[in-house]
Amino acid sequence: MTSPTPAETGDGTPSSKPSNFLRQIIERDLAQGTYAQRRWAGSPGDAQHQQAGQPDPARIRTRFPPEPNGYLHVGHAKSICLNFGLARDYGGVCHLRFDDTNPEKEELEYVESIKDAVQWLGFGWDAHGTSHLYQASDYFDVMYRAAEYLVEAGLAYVDEQTPEQMRANRGDFSRPGVDSPFRSRSVDENLQRLRAMRDGQLPDGAAVLRAKIDMASPNINLRDPALYRIKHAEHHNTGSKWCIYPMYTFAHPIEDALENITHSICTLEFEDQRPFYDWLLDRLREGGLINTPQPRQHEFARLNLTYVVTSKRKLKQLVDEKHVSGWDDPRMPTIVGLRRRGYTPEAIQLFAERIGVTKSDSWIDYSTLDGCLREDLENKAHRGMAVLDPVKLVLTNWAEAFGTDGYTEPCTQPALPHSAIAEGQTPPPDRVFQIGKEVWIEREDFEEVPPKGYKRLFPGNVVRLKGGYVIECTGCAKDAAGNVTEVHAKVIPGTKSGTPGADSVKAKAAITWVGVADGVSAEVRLYDRLFTDPQPDAGGKNFLDALNPDSLKVVTAYVEPSLAAAKPDQKFQFERHGYFVADRVDHGVEGKVVFNRVTGLKDSWAR
Ligand code: ATP
Ligand code: MG
């Protein structure tokens, strides 16, 4: 575990965030003034552009670089919290960069959903009077110039081997690669062929531009990696201007350099790419193409969360095959799904902080996320009573006690418990609900023949209707099949909560209830984990085999009036049941009351 050490914050006040290796690297760079002399012209660009600018007002620059080809998931949330969080804490700026160097059709829907997700999580890209929202395809011109520079410097060549030959000649871990016959072409010939590629004179796959590094390198990524490939395809941003597109490993370091990124943070899979990242930026720096000092790449372990899958392809399959209702199905680990389920940005930020960043892969138990949600909502979510499996309780002596069967009496309970109110904070107004002759109770709160130790309703037992009166159970009514259709009890007048007589009769238990008079019928969606296997797709398993058949149960419940008045997205603690949210899509539509269960009050999966 990491220990809390003071970290600098953007505004210079110390914070006590747990330290980690990335914070240590940044703090060291700041202490040494590694990036202190850099200039920034207000927008991304090459060395000449940036040198004409001002001293960079951002002490560090990080970036979150999604490919806009799907909805973001909880793993991306970790990366967002990390990159934007570090920039915030150290007086820096985090860029949102759409990595759209692939000419595949970019869907506007994804771009918008990614922007929404970042903002919903509590972050933004505006700083120092500029919007730091960028798209990598805007850098194609500079990337191509960098490619010609490498050719001119004798550091790249056009390879016209077939893809099969190229693969075979790359070698493997035990065998060094073999030089391509095209490797020794002259600079002039390379330049000519690169321009022929660019000008559309060659078909897809006929040639690639490769860096000339070392075909015998023990790091296969340095065996003359491809920089540009031919792809006659329209690009959403650049149209038909290009028919060659940069490879990710070539494009990414240049994107970082043009944007003055200081700390380029990525997941561990890219560790083996770091030598090429550095090789490329070293060469471009020597050529005077990029601003200095150049960005550095740092890798951290990606988030693996139990009971979910986080591959975009698999998530898409769940949607396409209708195992879930859509990308925002509350069982999906997408950010839109987590949001609709009722997870809060604060809980996700807390989660990201708590799991920290490490250099080695591990699995985080899903219950950690739920723990963060409970921690966030414990003092925030208003309480309310809901009966999820209702049976009617009839107080048979009601008219005798209060004059008429139709009499109802208001009961009040605090919206938040005393412990949730901070010193000096005004508590929210009390909830008000009516008690009458008939109330809804949970079916499990009555037993005709009580099991040992049962304290709730059974004939002869005395309990309190929470916030209302003490009652004594007298029996029940049943249908022909023997199912309980009504529970019967007698109200004991003078025992109402909050009155002097409240303690005059001792109750064995307090049970939750909702009045028949003012209770509102609600659709409650009881969500559970989508998979029964903690690692549904590990080791080549078919994740669909582990789908939990009980991941959604829909019940018709009764809720007290304060809950029925919820706004979409509002979170509550249903007493004894857990945390619930008014569904942001369906709640309130045609007057319907719809709640989703976020999670229980305690971890029901822990054994
Ligand atoms: P997927 O594998 O689901 O398609 P991806 O990595 O291809 O995701 P990108 O759009 O390239 O998706 O990711 C944007 C950023 O999010 C990258 O910097 C990547 O490192 C980070 N990221 C993706 N998945 C995770 C994860 N599970 N944990 C932490 N960071 C992640
Ligand atoms: Mg990716």
Image (cartoon, helix red, strand yellow):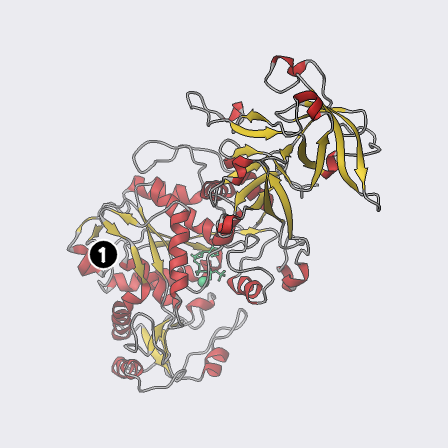
Picture layout, residue 152 above or below residue 551: below
Q: Classify mark 1: residues with Cα within 10 Å, few (<14), some (14-19) or many (20+).
A: some
| 69 or 38, nearer to the observer | 69
Q: Is residue 302 visible?
A: no
Counting from the top left corner in percent of width and height, residue 214 is at 40, 71
Counting from the top left corner in percent of width and height, residue 302 is at 50, 53
Picture layout, residue 227 above or below residue 111: below
Q: For disc 1, does the CB lie below 8 Å from ligand 1?
A: no
Counting from the top left corner in percent of width and height, residue 300 is at 47, 51
Residue lying furthest left in this view? 52
- Please name the residue that numbered disc 1 is placed on: 43
Of the 4 image quadrants, the one containing the C terminus is: top right
> Which element is circle 1 on?
loop
Q: Ligand 2 appears in which quadrant?
A: bottom left
At horizontal 56% and vertical 66% (from top left) the residue drawn is: 317
Counting from the top left corner in percent of width and height, residue 104 is at 40, 72
Picture layout, residue 262 above or below residue 323: above
Residue lying furthest front in this view? 404
In this rendering, position of residue 546 left or right of residue 75 = right
| 176 or 597, nearer to the observer | 597
At horizontal 48% and vertical 53% (from top left) the residue drawn is: 336
In this rendering, position of residue 443 left or right of residue 46 = right
At horizontal 35% and vertical 40% (from top left) the residue drawn is: 89
Q: Is residue 391 visible?
A: yes
In this figure, what is the number of numbered marks?
1
| 94 or 186, nearer to the observer | 94
Amino acid at dot 1 = Ser
In this rendering, position of residue 434 left or right of residue 197 = right
Picture layout, residue 277 above or below residue 42: below
Q: Quadrant of residue 559?
A: top right
